Image: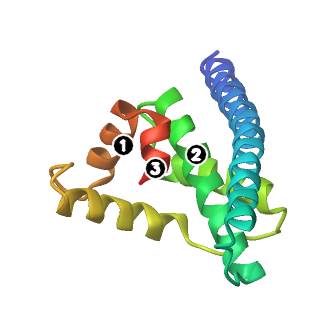
Amino acid sequence: MANLQTLKTNLDAAILEAAKMAEALGIASNAQNEAQQAYDIALAESIQSGTLGFVSSVSSLEIIERNAGIQGAATFIQANPTCTLDEAVQAWTTSAIAATELQVLIQNPNTLFQIYATNLHNAGVISDTTWESLRSWIIATPIAEILAD
């Protein structure tokens, strides 16, 4: 009977994880669409104003990846306030890869999360550079404000 209970517990955990993954995929799709729209608007404005300088295709992909990644991760974190750094990185990765249509990331989300935490700490916004402090700030901050930084 104990083995049956263990199997049931494992099944329940797997179902919950599958639901989280499905939610993350939906978030990634939304993040991709919003990132693409923001990029298209910015590109059109740059062309109209004549301020569009040369931007390599790799630099453009880095910007698209980073914007989609942070939006997907922040949305996931706000929906799952007790998530781990690894889960946030997975949400980032899913969103970023969907936005760029590449097979791999160009940038390391763990490194970017640490840079964001350090910058926020240095600005006096969060008390330290831990994941918990960064996550708390993301949970309490509107997505638009996070994306503006």
Q: CA distance from mark 1 to mark 2?
A: 13 Å
- Residue 105 appears in the rendering: no
In the rendered structure, which disc, 3 or 1, sits on the residue that comes first in sequence? 1
Residue at the spot of label 1: 135
Residue at the spot of label 2: 71
Left or right: where does residue 124 sit relative to residue 2? Answer: left
| Mark carried by residue 148 | 3
Bin the neighbour count of mark 2 within 10 Å (Cα to Cα): few under 14, some 14-19, many 20 and up. Answer: many
Tag 3–tag 1 contact (CB < 8 Å): no
- Residue 29 appears in the rendering: yes
Q: Quadrant of the N terminus?
A: top right
Counting every numbered tag in the picture gives 3
Query: Residue 70: where, in percent of width, then height?
Result: 55, 52
Bin the neighbour count of mark 1 within 10 Å (Cα to Cα): few under 14, some 14-19, many 20 and up. Answer: many
Residue sticking out furthest to the top: 1
Q: Secondary structure at mark 1?
A: helix
Nearer to us of marks 3 and 2 is 3
Q: Quadrant of residue 72?
A: top right
